[in-house]
Image (cartoon, rainbow, N blue to C red):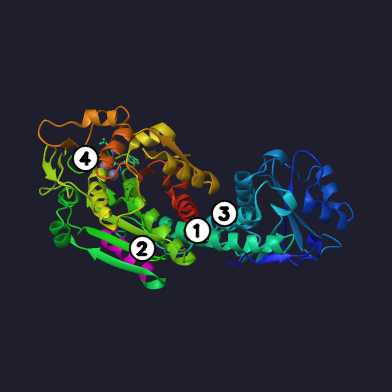
């Protein structure tokens, strides 16, 4: 897909379709008014006759606009003009893409954010437009014998008012395309079933990033090397699985070696049966998504490869299956983590924190400025926040502010949750340094506290994406979150 920046009077731009905003209140906005003038009031007559309107998500396709260079116009309801910000822009554009899906049109120009119609900067409106469009056309059909129908639209013009707007829009479109590439990789990896997306497959995906872009180095560790590192927590999770585990270390160096990197640790459980503490069957297929932390981190690395940003980022991804079996870890088994701390595995289904404990310890060797871990860690986080917000846990207020702001800007929101030391009390063990579960209450916070034992006090944050990494039901599939949040954070760090 291409997103050319367009300058000049809207009504004189040649296109198959001009996407124009309509509000429930006030006069016709910028470009819509220019079209109305050029067509001698055709648009206003449409609205007046009730054939188009400003209700959110309502669309009307109009052909035969006399006096303009556009073959058609799509009038998109955008609600109240005072509320029209980034989020509403995204919904409107997504409604527009749906309306154009079956028209066979190959190109369009979006005037939804033109001339102050939206309260969004030129940079962000271009970025959001590109991201939204790319994700609306996303399909996962690689495992179907016949591919799904694809939208024909290959070019979406981004109109700008002046040279400054053109520069900002180009920058926004480039960042949006890079984010979309990362989101789409995260979605593909998440959507692939566990018999395809194995730890080895995740390692190949990381290798592909290292091959395709400049400034990457990669190391893929197998079980003997993981054992030599003393990662007993990670090994205890993979013990019941035939499928071999991997530790993926993907290093992006966009800044001088003297610049401390940001470390990203992503939970890569390619299937979570629960192990001996086995899960019930309902929706168990969705535990193929338990590697979405890894997918989000790899997606973010791909975006960085596209952007060639001037930072250093190292991804540390522990990847394995959590299976039952005669070799599987039993409840009550005590394992020694790479940090030296011993862990009593009271519940083999609390496995994400075990593999991340060793990944967080490993990440310390890079002396990172920040360490973020990303994980589909707890059902409790889904209960607390639903599917709207990713759970953010950190004891570093400055880092929390940065991540929350990145989430707001990128429309990939996080909500801060507590991880105080008191949450650790329920995880005391009579037999080991710590147990891997506490009480059911505050489960997302006690899981976060467990992780904090393996990270430094400041500079560490945990993102629980259990509720946001995928959707269930009719629209079942990976969302690619939190790639937009992470990339925005890294671009502004
Ligand atoms: N991968 C799950 C968390 C999960 C469950 C995410 C459902 C999304 C939907 C994780 O490994 C897990 O099983 N967590 C347990 C922890 C418990 C045993 C303390 C959970 O949340 O039930
Ligand atoms: Mn589990
Ligand atoms: Zn899990």
Q: Identify which residue is drawn at 76% across, 60% down.
A: 72
Quadrant hosting ligand 3: top left
Give the magenta-colored segment's residue range: 198-210
**Which is more N-terminal, label 4 or label 2?**
2
- Of 457 and 333, nearer the camera is 457
Residue at numbered disc 3? 132
Residue at numbered disc 2? 258
Residue at numbered disc 1? 179
- Note whether ligand 1 is within 8 Å of mark 3: no
377 vs 368: above or below: above
- Note whether ligand 3 is within 8 Å of mark 2: no
Q: CA distance from mark 2 to mark 4?
A: 46 Å
Q: Nearer the viewer, mark 2 or mark 3?
A: 2
- Note whether ligand 2 is within 8 Å of mark 4: no
Q: SS class of the residue under badge 2?
A: loop
Please check the rendered image and state whether residue 200 is part of the magenta-colored stretch, yes or no: yes
Q: SS class of the residue under badge 4?
A: loop
Q: SS class of the residue under badge 1?
A: helix
Q: CA distance from mark 4 to mark 1?
A: 36 Å
**Which is more N-terminal, label 1 or label 3?**
3
Q: SS class of the residue under badge 3?
A: helix
- Of 273 and 221, nearer the camera is 221
Q: CA distance from mark 3 to mark 4?
A: 38 Å
């Amino acid at each position: 897909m291409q997103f050319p920046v367009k300058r000049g009077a809207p009504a004189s731009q040649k296109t198959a379709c001009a996407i124009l905003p309509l509000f429930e209140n006030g006069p016709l906005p910028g470009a819509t008014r220019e079209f109305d003038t050029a067509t001698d009031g055709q648009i206003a007559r449409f609205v007046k006759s009730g054939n188009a309107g400003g209700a959110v998500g309502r669309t009307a396709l109009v052909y035969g606009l006399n006096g303009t260079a556009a073959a058609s116009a799509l009038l998109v309801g955008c609600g109240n003009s005072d509320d029209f910000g980034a989020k509403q822009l995204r919904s409107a554009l997504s409604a527009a893409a749906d309306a154009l899906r079956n028209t066979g049109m190959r190109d369009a120009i979006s005037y939804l954010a033109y001339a102050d119609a939206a309260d969004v900067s030129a940079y962000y409106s271009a970025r959001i437009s590109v991201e939204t469009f790319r994700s609306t056309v996303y399909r996962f059909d690689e495992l179907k014998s016949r591919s799904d129908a694809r939208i024909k639209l290959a070019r979406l013009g981004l109109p700008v008012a002046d040279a400054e707007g053109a520069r900002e829009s180009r920058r926004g479109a480039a960042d949006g395309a890079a984010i979309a590439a990362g989101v789409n990789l995260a979605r593909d990896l998440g959507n692939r079933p566990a018999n395809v997306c194995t730890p080895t497959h995740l390692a190949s995906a990381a290798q592909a990033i290292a091959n395709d872009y400049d400034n990457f180095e990669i190391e893929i560790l197998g079980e003997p090397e993981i054992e030599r590192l003393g990662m007993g927590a990670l090994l205890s999770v993979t013990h019941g699985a035939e499928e071999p585990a991997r530790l993926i270390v993907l290093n992006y160096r966009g800044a001088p070696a003297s610049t401390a990197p940001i470390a990203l640790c992503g939970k890569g459980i390619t299937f979570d049966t629960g192990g001996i503490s086995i899960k019930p069957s309902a929706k168990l297929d969705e535990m193929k998504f338990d590697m979405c932390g890894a997918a989000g981190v790899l997606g973010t690395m791909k975006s960085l490869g596209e952007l060639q940003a001037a930072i250093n980022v190292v991804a540390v991804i522990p990847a394995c299956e959590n299976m039952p079996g005669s070799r599987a870890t039993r409840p009550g088994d005590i394992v020694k983590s790479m940090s030296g701390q011993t862990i009593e595995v009271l519940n083999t289904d609390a496995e994400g924190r075990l593999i991340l404990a060793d990944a967080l310890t490993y990440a310390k060797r890079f002396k990172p400025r920040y360490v973020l871990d990303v994980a589909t860690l707890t059902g409790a986080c889904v209960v607390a926040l639903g599917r709207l917000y990713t759970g953010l846990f950190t004891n570093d207020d400055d880092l929390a502010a940065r991540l929350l702001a990145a989430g707001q800007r990128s429309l990939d929101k996080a909500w801060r949750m507590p991880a105080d030391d008191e949450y650790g009390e329920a995880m005391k063990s009579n037999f080991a340094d710590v147990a891997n579960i506490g009480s059911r209450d505050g489960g997302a916070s006690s899981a976060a506290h467990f992780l904090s034992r393996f990270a430094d006090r400041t500079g560490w944050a945990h993102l629980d994406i259990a509720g946001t990494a995928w959707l269930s039901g009719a629209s079942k599939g990976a969302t690619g979150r939190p790639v937009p949040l992470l990339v925005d954070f890294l671009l502004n760090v």
